Image (cartoon, rainbow, N blue to C red):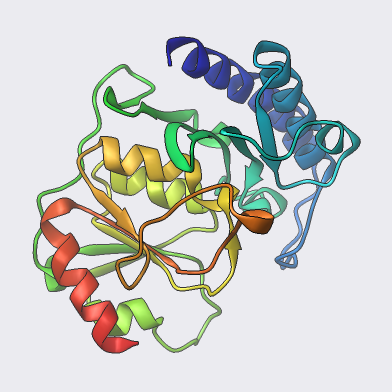
């Protein structure tokens, strides 16, 4: 997978350059809708799909933005590239830096290559199955060894001011809760040992929301599954995930899973 990783990282870097060009002049939106899409999303996706499809013309592609370049490509196959050009577009729109470029390759439904790049922060985390997880300075990433939910840091999506604690927060009672818009950023933080656990309890989201980060966490020594222990696979009908997501340190995983099951 050396070529796959090299091309994916190059695509993420070039897409990030274009994103930052547009980010510099973008007028911040205080409360953007969850469905917001910008020119940066489509431009970045076109760059990524062009590089990947030129390098791997026989592969299939799943990507978030409905663009002509996406629709011209094969949509299903044993090798599936999964692309989110800007994960956390609300963070881009608010200009708070909370967004990422996510590129993954799934082979026969299993995510085996993942790149998560955070353009505004100059961070990049990448992994290949069996080769570990790495960060921008060339050092290896490892999940934490925290085993107690009450001592853990939970990273989750941003909540509305005054909102009740999330289901994950109620189930785990973590010591600390960090919030950010991007799932890619959340999963990278778990892989890098900056947070202990991330829970997504949505009943419907997409492959591109989690595939790249999934590889990071598992290759950093963590565990990833649905919120009731389901195996996460990619490339299903509509590229939809319906089992939620639990990503955590290996030491914390069994206890977190038990509590989430009990709370459901």
Return the x and y of residue 206 as percentages of the image width and height.
60, 57
Question: Left or right: where does residue 154 sit relative to residue 213?
Answer: left
For the point 20% across and 37% down, which residue is it?
142
Asked if residue 175 can be seen in this view, the reply is no
Q: Relative to 201, say whether 198 is above or below.
A: above
Looking at the rendered image, the quarter that the C terminus falls into is: bottom left
For the point 75% across and 67% down, which residue is it?
33
Question: Left or right: where does residue 124 sit relative to residue 32?
Answer: left
User: Which corner quadrant of the image does residue 112 belong to?
Assistant: top left
For the point 57% across and 45% down, which residue is it?
97
193 and 10: which is toward the camera: 10
Return the x and y of residue 84 as percentages of the image width and height.
64, 42
Return the x and y of residue 176 as percentages of the image width and height.
25, 68
Q: Relative to 78, say whether 97 is above or below.
A: below
Return the x and y of residue 228 as percentages of the image width and height.
32, 73
Question: Left or right: where does residue 228 sit relative to residue 59?
Answer: left
For the point 27% across and 26% down, which residue is it?
130
Q: Relative to 209, say whether 246 is above or below.
A: below
Number of numbered markers: 0
Q: In the orientation shown, which residue stands out farthest toward the right?
A: 68
Question: Left or right: where does residue 40 sit relative to residue 103?
Answer: right
Q: Relative to 255, say whether 48 is above or below.
A: above
Asked if residue 76 can be seen in this view, the reply is yes
Looking at the rendered image, the quarter that the N terminus falls into is: top left
205 and 173: which is toward the camera: 205
């Amino acid at each position: 997978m050396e070529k796959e990783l090299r091309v994916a990282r190059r695509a993420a870097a070039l897409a990030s350059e274009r994103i930052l060009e547009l980010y510099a002049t973008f007028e911040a939106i205080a409360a953007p809708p969850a469905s917001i899409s910008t020119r940066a999303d489509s431009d970045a996706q076109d760059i990524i799909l062009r590089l990947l499809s030129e390098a791997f013309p026989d592969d299939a592609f799943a990507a978030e933005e409905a663009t002509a370049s996406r629709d011209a490509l094969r949509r299903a196959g044993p090798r599936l590239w999964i692309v989110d050009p800007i994960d956390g577009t609300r963070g881009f729109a608010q200009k708070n830096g909370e967004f990422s470029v996510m590129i993954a390759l799934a082979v026969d439904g299993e995510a085996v290559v993942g790149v998560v790049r955070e353009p505004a922060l100059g961070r990049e985390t990448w992994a290949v199955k069996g080769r570990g997880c790495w960060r921008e300075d060339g050092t290896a990433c490892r999940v934490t060894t925290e085993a107690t939910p009450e001592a853990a840091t939970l990273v989750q999506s941003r909540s509305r001011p005054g909102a009740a604690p999330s289901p994950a927060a109620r189930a785990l009672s973590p010591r600390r809760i960090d919030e950010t818009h991007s799932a890619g950023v959340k999963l990278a933080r778990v892989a890098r040992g900056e947070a202990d656990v991330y829970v997504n309890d949505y009943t419907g989201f997409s492959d591109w929301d989690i595939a790249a980060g999934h590889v990071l966490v598992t290759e950093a020594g963590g565990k990833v599954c649905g919120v009731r222990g389901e195996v996460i696979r990619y490339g299903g009908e509509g590229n939809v995930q319906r089992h939620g997501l639990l990503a955590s340190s290996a030491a914390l995983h069994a206890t977190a899973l038990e509590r989430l099951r009990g709370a459901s």
